[in-house]
């Protein structure tokens, strides 16, 4: 009778000792001598390998030769308590099936390759210990996101991927068209005609689901989106992707303090989830990638995040500069903070996460709620959550609910409203105070895994000049 396969994650159950078991997976290593051979097998269900002990006399010589690093096999035999150090149980291999051989040009054969090298072989890097750990954690974080919001009364809301509006107004959108680019028709002014394009207008991939999210929140009360977003910004940094996943909750009747409470509570929940549910993988990453990882994650849970007005942040930075701290970029009220400034506040000055809020309106998006201040020094109720090692992990705001003020801002910025009339209707019909934020999912994964480059926490990264795989 054929024995049903057990996943390796389930094999370390003491109740199975003494049973015949079957495991299937990819060979990590094979070593041994003429008397005994040891195969370390991994099937992706856990960071742990199971050891299969084989008597070479009982197995075909050619088959044994084919059991090399990377080969795919199935093995059946009795599960016994292990004599050797490093594992609690092992399998006394009786029958081995070879599913796929693995020639020795297998790109993941050598241990200790650089992440740079691994990126060039991103289709195979998934099979390594490090990337297995990262992507199991990524899955767990996605589950944490859904659990958090569902348990707190938010509805999962699907905002569109294709859109005609630029939410962040930064003009960094990837265009979507079915037009024949070899035969582009232009009108008398030299503009491309879109009325005969697929959607009858110019469309792009979304940079954010927020605008549609606001429609959801002002109907269902509290929603969150969780989907891919696209930005054609030419940023070749370890923190930017052209395609990344964003989580955007949006809540009716939420004001500034409540927004910051939600941001902090949500991130802490995700970090705690990782500590509670990804122990083996975190311990592996803590050992191999970043010795301070687990301590840093636990530290986040203990501290209250600092809440600091932008203006106060600028004062601290100016004072630091006048006391001799060297910054590459200048600091002045009204300017955006460079990552060195954010890191100074978080890593040097406060040594804990900081939520900066009440930013000058000129450096934030049009939809943020305006504070009552003179024009030239007007701030808006935007919040950025700044994290050690990461910098900005969340960007959010209270939204401007007054139609008059919002229209004023749209006019002041010359934003075309032809594709936004539906958004403005939220302010026209039963407008309400509301707020929300966006968390970059990969930046959260960077923090939770201790990985250094955002290209290493998404299976197949999209960055300028790179869409392989
Ligand atoms: O600060 P951002 O641009 O905010 C928005 O898009 C708002 N519409 C969110 C909202 O209020 N609903 O982006 C939010 C977060 C950033 O804090 C960052 O974590 C992440 O998205 N992010 C990126 N992550 C990876 N690659 C990029 N190019 C990113 N751009 C933003
Ligand atoms: Mg931002």
Image: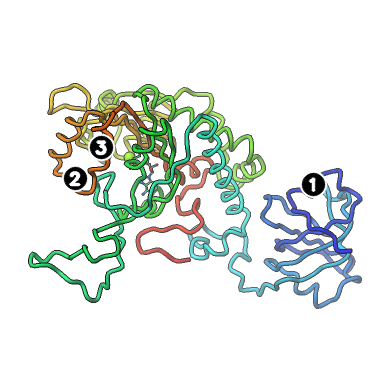
For the N terminus, give its image quadrant. bottom right
**Is label 2 or label 3 in front?**
3
The reply, left or right, for residue 127 in relation to residue 321 is right
10 Å crowding of disc 2: few (<14), some (14-19), many (20+) = some
Q: Residue at x 63, y 41 (%)?
A: 278
In the picture of the structure, the residue carrying the numbered disc 2 is 417
Q: Residues within 10 Å of mark 3 (few under 14, many from 20)?
A: few
Q: Tag 2, which secondary structure?
A: loop
Secondary element under disc 1, as helix, strand or loop, is loop
Instruction: Residue 425: give its label.
Output: 3
Q: What kind of element bears circle 3?
A: helix
Residue 217 quadrant:
top left
Q: Earlier in the sequence, mark 1 or mark 2?
A: 1
Q: Residues within 10 Å of mark 1 (few under 14, many from 20)?
A: some
Q: Check if mark 2's residue and mark 3's residue have beta carbons within 8 Å.
A: no
Quadrant of the rendered image holding ligand 2? top left
Alpha-carbon distance for marks 1 and 2?
61 Å
25 shown above or below 391: below
In terms of image quadrants, where is residue 96? Answer: bottom right
> At which x and y percent is residue 434?
34, 28
Q: CA distance from mark 2 to mark 3?
A: 12 Å
Q: Which mark is residue 49?
A: none
Which numbered disc flags the more N-terminal residue, 1 or 3?
Answer: 1
What residue is rendered at 16% in x and 27% in y? Answer: 377
As drawn, which residue projects farthest toward the front? Answer: 429
Q: Dot 1 corresponds to which residue?
A: 12
Residue positioned 31% across, 29% down in the render: 398
Q: Which residue is more in the foreground, 203 or 422?
A: 422
Find out if the beta carbon at label 2 lies less than 8 Å from the nearest ligand 1 atom.
no
Residue 178 location, x and y as percent?
31, 68
Furthest-bottom residue in this view: 62
Extreme residue toward the left, this view: 188
């Amino acid at each position: 009778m054929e024995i049903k396969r057990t996943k390796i994650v389930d094999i370390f159950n003491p109740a199975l000792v003494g049973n015949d078991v079957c495991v299937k997976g990819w060979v990590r290593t094979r070593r041994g001598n003429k008397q005994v051979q040891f195969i370390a097998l991994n099937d992706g269900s856990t960071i742990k390998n199971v050891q299969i002990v084989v008597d070479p006399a009982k197995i075909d010589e050619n088959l044994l030769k084919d059991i090399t690093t990377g080969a795919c096999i199935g093995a059946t035999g009795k599960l016994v308590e292990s004599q050797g150090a490093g594992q609690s149980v092992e399998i006394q291999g009786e029958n081995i099936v070879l599913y796929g051989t693995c020639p020795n040009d297998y790109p993941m054969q050598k241990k200790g390759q650089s992440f740079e090298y691994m990126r060039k072989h991103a289709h195979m890097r998934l099979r390594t210990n490090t990337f297995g750990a990262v992507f199991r954690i990524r899955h767990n974080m996605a589950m944490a996101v859904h659990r958090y919001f569902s348990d707190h009364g938010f509805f999962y809301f699907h905002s569109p991927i294709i859109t005609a509006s630029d939410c962040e107004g930064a003009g960094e959108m990837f265009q979507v068209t079915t037009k024949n680019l070899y035969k582009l028709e232009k009108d008398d002014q030299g503009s491309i005609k879109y009325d005969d394009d697929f959607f009858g207008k110019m469309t792009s991939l979304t940079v954010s689901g927020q605008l549609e999210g606001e429609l959801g929140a002002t109907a269902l009360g509290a929603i969150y989106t969780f989907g891919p977003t696209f930005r054609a910004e030419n940023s070749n940094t370890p923190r930017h992707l052209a395609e990344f996943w964003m989580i955007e909750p949006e809540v009716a009747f939420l004001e500034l303090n409540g927004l910051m409470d939600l941001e902090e509570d949500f991130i802490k929940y995700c970090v705690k989830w990782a500590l509670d549910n990804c122990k083996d993988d975190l311990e592996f990453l803590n050992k191999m990638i970043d010795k301070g990882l687990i301590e840093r994650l636990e530290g986040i849970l203990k501290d209250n995040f600092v809440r600091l007005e932008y203006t106060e942040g600028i004062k601290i930075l100016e004072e630091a500069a006048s006391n001799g701290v060297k910054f590459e970029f200048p600091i002045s009220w009204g300017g955006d903070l460079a990552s060195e400034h954010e890191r100074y506040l978080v890593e040097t000055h406060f040594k804990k996460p900081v939520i900066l809020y009440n930013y000058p309106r000129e450096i934030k998006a049009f939809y943020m709620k305006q504070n009552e201040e003179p024009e030239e020094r007007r701030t808006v109720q935007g919040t950025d959550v700044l994290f050690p090692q990461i910098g900005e992990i969340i960007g959010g705001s209270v939204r401007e609910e007054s139609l008059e003020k919002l229209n004023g801002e749209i006019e002041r910025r010359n934003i075309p409203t032809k594709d936004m009339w539906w958004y403005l209707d939220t302010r026209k019909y039963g407008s309400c105070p509301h707020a929300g934020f966006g968390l970059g999912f990969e930046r959260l994964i960077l923090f939770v895994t201790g990985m250094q480059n955002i290209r290493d926490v998404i299976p197949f990264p999209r960055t300028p000049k790179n869409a392989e795989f």
